[in-house]
Image: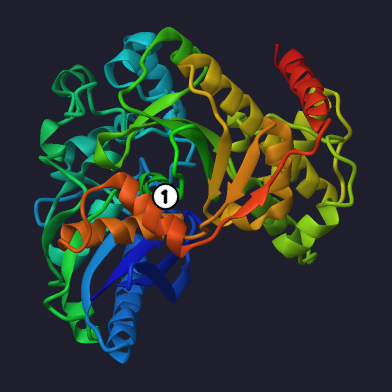
């Protein structure tokens, strides 16, 4: 038995084949493809039809690899980034390419909604931090187009619909939209207040639900079996990644590190109070009803943009080589607020980083290595602020930080995180989102029990982590850097 985990990130997508043999998980990458936003008639958009084509080709490869291993591809599950969606007509067709959350069209909608509904009152409805790119504000920005549409499907649900024809709304991802209430149901009153059609969304689906079997003609023609089931996983990639954190105790924080950094802890229930609101924390739903209490922080998007801008000038750089060079640059010379809304959109990232350094009164980066050091130091400082804020607001003691996702490969950032936070860091697994995706599929197939602790133990047994202990004496320097940042921010 094997399952295919489709893990879609903001810069790339992957199809991985997962098997469970003799009490250990095995994960084999079978396809990888580029992803990213592009301009479509003046709107920064996702090319989801192209993504579906790549996914179907990847599933055909997974089917062949499974066959070569003497087994079958029994299921597929899809996870992706949150908040973005496709609008469908009554025939199930896209009315427009899905807009990218970095498109600036939502700024006016954010201002309009928060002038109509007090921000604190809006936060109390869902526990979701008010970010201008949330689905709620995107739908308001889409105006008549949203009101004319028949359905709204978040990205993983949109892909599932393409694969099996079923329209479903998976609950963990839906929890990020700001359209659910505190009971984790669609907030009908909010839809009515903002004039959003309630028919855009339907019944919420739990992770592990078998939606159907693959019916896509192109997938079947490529060799995918019509017996391959499509299973709704914890489809927000962070929900899947946190499911696969190899923690064996409760006193841990996680950093799901990729294009974005999601820094948080797990809680039994949402924490919706004024301190959490003022500190910018959000309450997203995780697997097994757990609450992911976290903060969204810029991630490797910053470095990706810097590398892209240098490349446009004919100066090619590799992220790994830049990180090695950055390790030779003095620490904390260049600092920015890695949570600043100013760093959200595309274009002139180097100029915006330099301007931010000037405002904070630090040195200004010029070389690619200096920009890299600026980004890594600033991320570590943001992680420190988030984790210290979590402990202050929740009372949770953090003894260890688990870094999962692509950032687990960046040893410099992992060490900086340990130094800045003053606690040990465990790095790995890199493919945590795919592992959580696969585990929920195995649960849906009845192969593993719905037991979060047992699933995490299985990950810990199957995928070793690498530890980073804080350097003695470094915490004081990071405390001074934090004080400098807070003073500059007022």
Task: Give the residue at mark 1.
Answer: 241
Q: Is residue 264 above or below residue 217?
A: above
The residue lying at 41 percent from left, 26 percent from top is 282
Say which quadrant the C terminus sits in.
top right
Q: Secondary structure at mark 1?
A: helix
From the top left corner, tell me how far across and down residue 373 is, in percent: 79, 45
The chosen color scheme is: rainbow
157 w.r.t. 475: above or below: below
Q: Is residue 145 visible?
A: no
Can you see residue 339?
yes
Left or right of 238, for residue 302: right
Few, some or many C-alpha atoms within 10 Å of disc 1 (few <14, some 14-19, many ≥20)? many
Q: Position of residue 253 (x, y in %)?
A: 51, 35
Residue 406 horizontal side relative to residue 3, left or right: right
State the residue in front, 25 or 62.
Answer: 25
Is residue 103 left or right of 314 when viewed as pictured? left
Residue 362 figure quarter = top right
| Vertical arrangement, residue 332 with respect to residue 123, above or below | below
Q: Position of residue 446 (x, y in %)?
A: 15, 61
Name the residue: 36% across, 66% down.
51
Residue 479, relative to residue 51: is it above or below?
above
The residue at the point 49 percent across, 42 percent down is 102
Q: Would residue 412 be found to the left or right of residue 329 on screen?
A: left
Residue 132 screen position, x and y as percent: 44, 28
Q: Nearer the viewer, residue 429 or 251?
A: 251
Q: Quadrant of the N terminus?
A: bottom left
């Amino acid at each position: 038995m094997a399952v295919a985990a489709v893990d879609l990130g903001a810069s790339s997508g992957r199809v991985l084949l997962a098997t469970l043999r003799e009490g250990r998980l095995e994960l084999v990458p079978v396809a990888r493809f580029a992803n990213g936003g592009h301009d479509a008639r003046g709107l920064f958009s996702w090319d989801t039809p192209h993504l579906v084509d790549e996914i179907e080709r990847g599933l055909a490869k997974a089917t062949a690899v499974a066959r070569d291993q003497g087994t079958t591809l029994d299921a597929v599950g899809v996870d992706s980034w949150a908040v973005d969606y496709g609008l469908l007509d009554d025939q199930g067709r896209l009315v427009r390419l899905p807009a990218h959350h970095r498109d600036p069209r939502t700024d006016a909608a954010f201002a309009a909604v928060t002038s109509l509904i007090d921000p604190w009152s809006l936060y109390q409805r869902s526990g979701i931090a008010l970010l201008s790119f949330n689905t709620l504000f995107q739908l308001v920005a889409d105006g008549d187009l949203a009101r004319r549409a028949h359905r709204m499907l978040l990205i993983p649900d949109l892909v599932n619909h393409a694969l099996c024809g079923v329209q479903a709304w998976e609950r963990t991802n839906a929890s990020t939209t700001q359209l659910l209430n505190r009971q984790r149901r669609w907030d009908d009153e909010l839809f009515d207040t903002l004039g959003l059609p309630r028919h855009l969304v339907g019944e919420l689906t739990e992770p592990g639900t078998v939606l159907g079997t693959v019916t896509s003609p192109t997938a079947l023609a490529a060799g995918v079996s019509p017996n391959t089931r499509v299973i709704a996983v914890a489809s927000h990639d962070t929900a899947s990644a946190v499911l696969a954190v190899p923690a064996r105790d409760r006193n841990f924080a996680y950093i799901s590190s990729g294009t974005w950094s999601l820094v948080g802890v797990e809680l039994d229930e949402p924490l919706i109070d004024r301190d959490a609101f003022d500190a910018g924390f959000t309450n997203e739903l995780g697997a097994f009803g757990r609450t992911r209490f976290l903060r969204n922080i810029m991630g490797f998007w910053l470095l990706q943009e810097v590398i892209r801008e240098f490349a446009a000038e004919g100066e090619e750089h590799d992220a790994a080589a830049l990180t090695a060079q950055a390790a030779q640059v003095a620490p904390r010379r260049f600092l920015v607020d890695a949570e600043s809304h100013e760093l959200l959109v595309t274009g002139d990232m180097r100029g915006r980083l330099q301007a931010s350094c000037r405002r904070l009164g630090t040195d200004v980066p010029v070389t690619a290595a200096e920009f890299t050091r600026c980004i890594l130091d600033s991320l570590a400082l943001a992680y420190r602020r988030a984790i210290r804020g979590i402990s202050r607001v929740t009372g949770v003691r953090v003894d260890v930080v688990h870094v999962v996702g692509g950032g687990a490969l960046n040893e410099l950032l992992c060490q900086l995180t340990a130094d800045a936070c003053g606690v040990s860091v465990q790095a790995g697994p890199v493919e945590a989102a795919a592992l959580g995706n696969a585990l929920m599929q195995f649960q849906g197939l009845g192969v593993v029990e719905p037991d979060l602790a047992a699933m995490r133990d299985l990950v810990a047994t199957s995928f070793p982590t690498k530890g980073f202990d804080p350097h003695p004496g470094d915490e004081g320097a990071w405390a001074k850097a934090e004080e400098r940042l807070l003073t500059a921010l007022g």
